[in-house]
Image: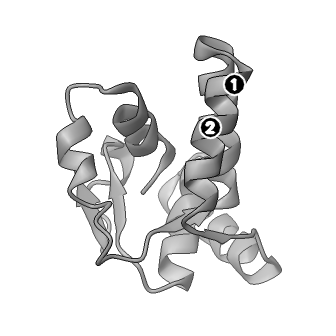
């Protein structure tokens, strides 16, 4: 799941229940390190450090995938090919590398293979 999905879930946004459906114990959730960065930063800015640390802990309970050289190069290629922003390219490249579906509300990714678009 990308940053927008986690933030929606954690903050109880209008699509929180839809995202929650992808966070069942039966599914292994993969979290790129850039998602950890983005979620922590946004939550800390808007809700404070204590809440941000709590949510970061929830993310760390998933399978956190570091940005490796191969993922970085794949992300750069995807960014060049599709005009993706850096974070979007890294998140999508991580999903591809891990052979996982990417759950996102980001319209820039909605038509990509392996993407579940939540709207």
In the picture shown, does residue 47 fall above or below 78?
above
Instruction: Please give the name of the residue rendered at 65% of the width and 76% of the height, measured from the top-left corner.
Output: 74
Closer to us: 82 or 106: 106
Answer whether residue 79 is visible to the viewer in this image: no
- Label annotation for residue 93: none
- Label annotation for residue 50: 1
Determine whether, in the image, residue 48 is placed left or right of residue 115.
Answer: right
Point out residue 73 in the picture as x, y percentages from the top left corner.
74, 75
In the picture shown, does residue 90 fall above or below 2?
below
Query: In the rendered image, which quarter contains the N terminus?
Result: bottom left
Determine whether, in the image, residue 82 is placed left or right of residue 104.
Answer: right
Q: How many marks?
A: 2
Determine whether, in the image, residue 14 is placed left or right of residue 103.
Answer: left
Point out residue 75 in the picture as x, y percentages from the top left corner.
64, 67
Query: Dot 1 surroundings within 10 Å: few (below 14), some, or many (20 or more)?
Result: few
Closer to us: 58 or 74: 58
Q: Secondary structure at mark 1?
A: helix
Closer to us: 117 or 17: 17
Instruction: Please give the name of the residue rendered at 41% of the width and 79% of the height, measured from the top-left corner.
Output: 100
- Label annotation for residue 54: 2
In the picture shown, does residue 32 fall above or below 77?
above
Instruction: Please give the name of the residue rendered at 55% of the width and 51% of the height, measured from the top-left corner.
Output: 58
Answer whether residue 77 is visible to the viewer in this image: yes
Q: Are marks 2 and 1 in contact (CB under 8 Å)?
A: yes
Point out residue 9 in the picture as x, y percentages from the top left corner.
35, 38
Furthest-right residue in this view: 69
Q: Where is residue 11, by image quadrant?
A: top left
Q: Secondary structure at mark 2?
A: helix
Query: Marks 2/1: CA distance?
Result: 6 Å
Query: Dot 2 surroundings within 10 Å: few (below 14), some, or many (20 or more)?
Result: few
């Amino acid at each position: 799941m990308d940053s927008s999905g986690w933030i929606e879930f954690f903050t109880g946004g209008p699509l929180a229940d839809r995202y929650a459906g992808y966070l069942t114990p039966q599914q292994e959730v993969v979290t790129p390190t850039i998602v950890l960065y983005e979620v922590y930063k946004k939550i800390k800015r808007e809700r404070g450090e204590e809440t941000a640390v709590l949510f970061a802990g929830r993310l760390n309970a998933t399978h956190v995938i570091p940005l490796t050289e191969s993922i970085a190069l794949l992300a750069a290629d995807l960014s060049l090919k599709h005009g993706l922003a850096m974070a979007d390219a890294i998140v999508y490249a991580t999903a591809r590398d891990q052979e996982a579906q990417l759950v996102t509300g980001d319209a820039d990714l909605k038509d990509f293979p392996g993407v579940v678009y939540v709207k």
